[in-house]
Amino acid sequence: MSRILRRVGGNDFLLMLDFDGVLAPIVARPNMARIGKRTRALLAACARRGRVAVISGRALADVRTRVGLSDIWYAGNHGAEWQMGKARGREKLSRALGTKLREAREAFAELSRGYRGVVVEDKVLTFSVHFRALARPHSARFRKDAERVAKKFAHFLDISEGAEYIFNIRPRAGRTKGDAVRLARKSASAKAVPIYIGDDTTDEDAFLALKGGITIRVGKSASSAAEYYFKTRASVDKFLRNLA
Ligand SMILES: [Mg+2]
């Protein structure tokens, strides 16, 4: 951690972070996820020192409410919605793609009725299927069934399994967290040292977009493109405190 802090030094920074698993602990049900009071205060302190952007797979309005800070930047739906200073917008889906997305969501909702604890979360531009609350012995069978459903839409939609028992379903060739990173860098001061902290599959797009910048993964993974890793989420708070 001290090496990362030395790289930032006294410079201006652009701190970008994922929400779930980075700012908020992972919980069984996604609507229970909360950022701790201390973490929020530390994030606010960082926002007084540099630029802060939360880049989440959640819908933008949802993550903004959960973080609860008005003077920072946000991107939601894995980069398909953004509010970064004057840059505000959301991806437009073609009618055909919108229909496929709805059909896929309905197919997963139908599948989930056979599994207790599985939740399909409609985020308009993308959707997620959460199965962390499903009894573990059923998860292998659920994965298989989900793959079967996913296959039908594979031509139009990208279906990837994230950390902590979740499927993220997004339009193929849609905007990613990598696009959110590029937009944030364009909107921030050119001198700001970019930092990205994430823990999930879709954060890899952000890590790749930030080659040469400071990339940190929460939890080690041999296949990650991140340069550094923190063992646990608690290290994020420690890092925020030092950065602020
Ligand atoms: Mg995450």
Image: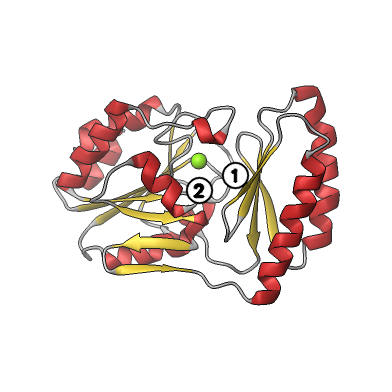
Q: Closest to the observer: 107 or 132?
A: 107
Give the x, y percent position of residue 217: 46, 40
Asked if 230 appears above or below 84 in the picture, the reply is above
Disc 1 marks a residue whose amino acid type is: Ser
**Which callout, 1 or 2, points at the residue further toward the start of the chain?**
2
Give the residue drawn at x 77%, y 40%: 112
Quarter occupied by the N terminus:
top left
Q: Nearer the viewer, mark 1 or mark 2?
A: 2
The kind of residue tagged 2 is: Arg
Residue 94 location, quadrant? bottom right
* Ligand 1 closer than 8 Å to label 2 CB: no
Q: Look at the image and tell me in which quarter the C terminus lies.
A: top left
Above or below, 13 relative to 234: below
Q: What is the number of the mark on residue 223?
A: 1
Nearest the viewer among 123 and 85 is 123
Residue depicted at 24% across the width and 33% down the height: 42
Q: Residue at x 76, y 61 (%)?
A: 103
* Residue nearer the viewer, 209 or 46: 46
Query: Quick one: SS at disc 2?
Result: loop
Q: CA distance from mark 1 to mark 2?
A: 24 Å
Residue at image location 59% in from the left, 72% down from the top: 93
In the rendered view, would you say 91 is above or below 45? Answer: below
Residue 163 appears at what percent x and percent y? 60, 38
The quarter of the picture where residue 18 lies is: top left
Q: Which residue is mark 2?
A: 58
* Residue 31, horizontal then vertical, whole percent: 52, 35
Structure colour scheme: secondary structure
Question: x, y (%) of residue 141?
Answer: 85, 34
